[in-house]
Amino acid sequence: MKPTLLILAAGMASRYGSMKQIDGFGPNGETIIDYSIYDAINAGFGKVVFIIKEEFVDNFKAIFEPKLAGRIETDYVFQNFDLKQFGIEEEIYREKPWGTAHAILSGRNVIKEPFCVINADDYYGFDAFKKMVDFLTTEVTDSNYSIIGYQIGKTLSEFGAVSRGVCKVDAAGNLEEIIERTKVYPKDGSIFYEENGEEFPLAYETPVSMNFWGFTPAVFKITEELFREFTEANKDKPKAEFFIPLIGENLVKSNTATFKVVPTDNKWFGVTYKEDKPYVQDSIDQLVKNGTYPEKLWN
């Protein structure tokens, strides 16, 4: 059974100012999602599931169905505010949904095979998809999951400091914890993070999470239980978000599951602000010129 690719594409993109998930970055208007799916197909994934807002389903189908028909199975699931589906009767006011871990619950009724989760607006590279397929087809169990670990030096921005989830890894290569560093930047040929006004160095190869996780469907039941606890604890905090690392942290600390940190030396890039667009376009242009991708991706 081929694994499934679950794409987080329901974000509101408030800092970007428009729907960056379907914005064009390639030479023929390809989205970043196009390159992820292209790599996923070549790596051996058998299905792609889009997590989106329901009102965008027609736009997504119009963009992706003509390209993907006959190449890979597709499905669409919706992240919304309905808490009753999780057995939560209390109505809790929110301006936006509950975060990435809440989002993956949207796929629980259509995913029956090992799967991985990625962001729609991040470029990950073929190596990461191939290594994830290998893990999901040979190593994954209900108590052994994975995360792709990127070298922090290959994830930094030219436009200022970034936040990164720094992975602490044990001798066996498994995740011990993810430490969120909210201000990471290059300086004088080295990499630093700032905390309480002090600078601390980070090695170029330090593994970080860029939200590329591998699971089995067993994670849905665990996530739903954690989500019910999270909503009860945060019902008076309208900006609290239930993120995927919270699942990992709970499973690791409770000794319920391990997470193998699978290293990749791919360069990551993504888009958060409008100012990122020219850099992403140039990066994709270089990948086309060096032969990583054809100029017309789906021809």
Image: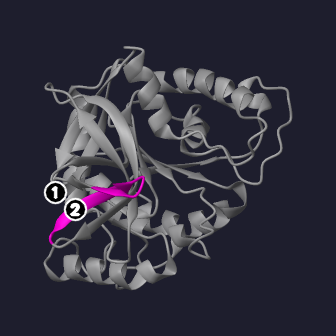
Residue sitting nearer the eye, 222 or 203: 203
Q: Position of residue 227 (x, y in %)?
A: 63, 29
Mark 1 sits on what residue? 204
Binning the other alpha carbons within 10 Å of mark 1 as few (below 14), some (14 to 19) or many (20 upward) gives some
Binning the other alpha carbons within 10 Å of mark 2 as few (below 14), some (14 to 19) or many (20 upward) gives some
Name which residue lies at 51% across and 76% down: 23
Give me the disc on residue 161: none
- Residues marked 1 and 2 touching at CB (< 8 Å): yes
Residue sitting nearer the eye, 234 or 13: 234
In this rendering, would 217 be left or right of 13?
left
Q: Secondary structure at mark 2?
A: strand
Q: Position of residue 155 (x, y in %)?
A: 28, 62
Q: Position of residue 183 (x, y in %)?
A: 39, 59
State which region is magenta. 189-199
In magenta stretch: residue 195: yes
Q: Position of residue 69 (x, y in %)?
A: 44, 60
Name which residue lies at 43% across and 72% down: 31
Question: Measured along the vertical axis of the image, is residue 204 above or below residue 254?
Answer: below
Mark 2 sits on what residue? 191
Residue type at tag 2: Ile
In this rendering, would 69 be left or right of 210?
right
Image quadrant where one finds the C terminus:
bottom left
Between the C-alphas of marks 1 and 2, the distance is 7 Å
